[in-house]
Amino acid sequence: DLTIKGSNDFDGAIWALDSLSLNRCTVSENRTGVYGGGTFIAKDSHFVSNDTAIDSGGVVILIDSIIAEGNVGIELQRGADLSVFHCTLKDNGNAIHGWSDIRVNIRNSLLVRNGYSSIYGGASAVEIDNYDGPAAFLSIVGSSIVDGPGGGIALHGSVDVTVVRSTISGNSSSVSLAYPSVVPGESSLNLRDSTIVGTPGTSNFIIWARDGEPTTRFATVAIKNSIIAGSSYQSPNCEVTPVDYTTLNVDFVSQAFNISDDDSCGLDDPKD
C-alpha cells in the first residue's frame, strides 16, 4: 500500500509518460494526481480530494477504484482512451471531462453526486467538449449516473453515445445534447434497455438538444426498450432548443418497447 499526497505541481504528483500501474494505492490532496500521455492502469486504488485526479492524453484503465471529492475526476486530452470497470466516481465537479477525438468506456460503475461547478464552469457528471476534431465516442453499459446537482451527460460538438442497461436519474438535466454536430449524421445518442428519469423539483429536461452557433447541425436520438420520465417545471421530457439564426435538426427515433410519461420524445412506434 502506498499513499501519495500533497503535491502542488500542475504536472502531476505522478507522471505516466510511458507505462505505469498502481495497485492498492491512495492519491490524495494533489493539484494533479496523475499526469501523462502513456498508459496508466490503476486497480483497487483511491483518488481523493485532488483538484484533478488524472490528466491524460494516453490510455487510462481503472478497475475497482474510487475517484472522489475533486474538481475534475478524470481529464482527457485529445486522443485519450479511457476504460472504467467496477469503479465509483462521486462528489466531483466533472467526474469525467474530455476534449476531441477521445474514447470513453464505462462498465458496471457508479457515478453519484457529480456535477458541481468545475474549473470549466461545467456542471455535469460526464462532459465532452469536441468542437474541432473527429467524433468522440462514449459508451456506458451496466452503470448508473445518479443524484447530480448538475447534468448527467453533457455533449458539445460531435459525439457518438451509446447507453445500454444503465440508469441516469435524479440529475438536474439527465442527458444534455448541446451543439450536437457539425456534420450531418455524425452525432448520435443510442439508448437501449435503460432508464432515464428526473427528480421532481430538481430535473428540467430529460433529453435536451441545444444549438449555439449560426450553422445547421444534426443529431439522432434512437431509443429502444427504455423508460424516459419525470421532467419538471412543466418542461417536456425531450426538448429541442435552437437559438437565434440557427437551424437545429434532431431526429428522435423509437425502436419500440419504450415508456414515456409525455409525447415529446417521438416514441410513436406501435409497440411503444
Image: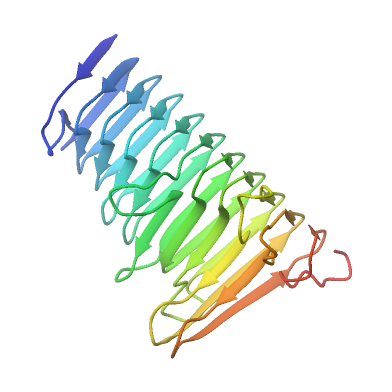
Q: Nearer the viewer, residue 29 or 161?
A: 29
> In the rendered image, which quarter contains the N terminus?
top left
| Residue 255 vertical placement versus 219 (above, below) | above
User: Measured from the top left, where is residue 189 in percent x and y?
Assistant: 57, 63
Point out the residue furthest to the bottom here: 245
Residue lying at 19% horizontally and 33% vertically, measured from the top left? 31
Question: Is residue 45 toward the left or the right of residue 243 in the image?
Answer: left
Q: Count numbered badges in the picture.
A: 0
Q: Nearer the viewer, residue 55 or 145?
A: 145
User: Measured from the top left, where is residue 91 in percent x and y?
Assistant: 44, 33
Quadrant for residue 252, please give it.
bottom right
| Residue 223 vertical placement versus 247 (above, below) | above
Point out the residue furthest to the right here: 270
User: Measured from the top left, where is residue 256 in percent x and y?
Assistant: 80, 64
Question: Is residue 6 toward the left or the right of residue 175 in the image?
Answer: left
| Residue 221 vertical placement versus 41 (above, below) | below
Residue lying at 26% horizontally and 56% vertically, measured from the top left? 78
> In the rendered image, which quarter contains the C terminus?
bottom right
Q: Nearer the viewer, residue 15 or 91?
A: 91
Question: Is residue 79 toward the left or the right of residue 96 in the image?
Answer: left
Residue lying at 62% horizontally and 71% vertically, measured from the top left? 239
